[in-house]
Image (cartoon, rainbow, N blue to C red):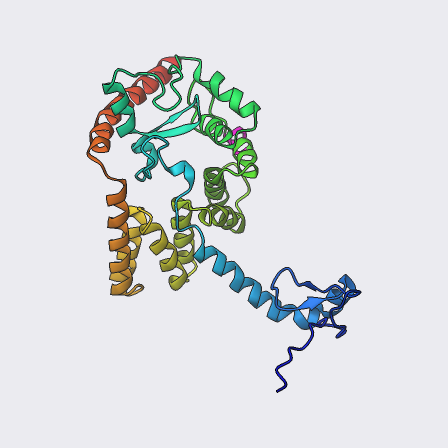
Amino acid sequence: MSGIQAAEACANCGRESSDAVKLRYCTACRLVKYCSVGCQKSHRKQHKKACKKRAAELKDERLYNQGHERPEGDFCPICTLPIPIPMNEHSAFMVCCIKRVCFGCSLAAQKRGMFDCPFCRTPMPRDGTELAMVQKRVDAKDAAALKFLGDQYYYGYNGLLKNVQRAIELWREAAELGSINAHFELGNKFDSGEGVIQDKAKAVQHWEMAAIQGDIESRNSLGVNEINNGNYERAVKHFLIAAKMGNEVALGNVNKMFANGLATREQYAEALKGFQDSVDEMHSQERDEGTTVCRDVQREEIAREIANRNRES
């Protein structure tokens, strides 16, 4: 061989790249190039099989190689540590600044006599003012605020009547603006058919969008979906990623697969070690104390909410 690299050429007509001829990749597979849309259309039938196969490979590479780190919203903005899962049991959502603060930092602030928002120092909202604070951020198209307001409509919190359709509308808008958590919720609804026409493919699309950005629960849901479809190798890959990011449910799923001969001993050991390393990273004595105290407060608030609903009905 001469060692001289052959010039790039159109996969259909063979025209070589030059100043006059600009070749462009097939955007789906990036295996071949074309000099024009016409050549790409003419070559489609011949190229379709290889294109589809490579496009699926590229999608899997992205799906399994990305999203191994938790997103910014999963970290307490004060101590900068990732918040344990499930986050709503270990942190509080601050409607003033749309931040989630871990219970350890909340309790530490209270011990210093600070009873306002521990992050932005805004006075804590009184009854009836929480939604007004959120609405300002919603009007500014804040994705996290839209997701939060959707949650309020879905569960019927803060005096709002339960409205699943309104919740889904808000989640859709939040997802379009980049909310990972909104993608997760929409995935759940398309999977179950609650409030929307059931569409398993759309559910997977939403979970994948969230998973590649680090959403643990979406990653676990993808694993469950693969289990249901009999794709055990793909399932264990998802569970391993989620377990090593601190998801105990995913760890349990790997354990069940191992017990049923669907995962190896090495895979379970890898999941167990990764899970423990993640838990150790999230743990602190202050968080343990804060979680105990704040959970008691949450239970009291839930009891009051139930009592208020009972009186209204």
Query: Residue 171 at what x, y percent from top left?
Result: 52, 34
Dominant secondary structure of the residues highlighted in magenta in the image: helix
The quadrant in which residue 103 appears is top left
| Location of residue 255 with respect to 5 vertically, above or below | above
Indicate left or right for 245 with 259 as reference.
right
| Location of residue 36 with respect to 99 vertically, above or below | below
Query: Residue 150 at what x, y percent from top left?
Result: 49, 29
Q: Does the magenta-highlighted stretch encompass residue 274? A: no
The quadrant in which residue 50 appears is bottom right
Q: Which residues are magenta?
A: 164-168
Query: Residue 230 at what x, y percent from top left?
Result: 41, 62
Q: Is residue 66 visible?
A: yes
Q: Quadrant of the C terminus?
A: top left
Farthest residue toward the right? 20
Indicate left or right for 185 with 30 as reference.
left
Q: Residue at x 52, y 24 (%)?
A: 137
Q: Is residue 260 visible?
A: no
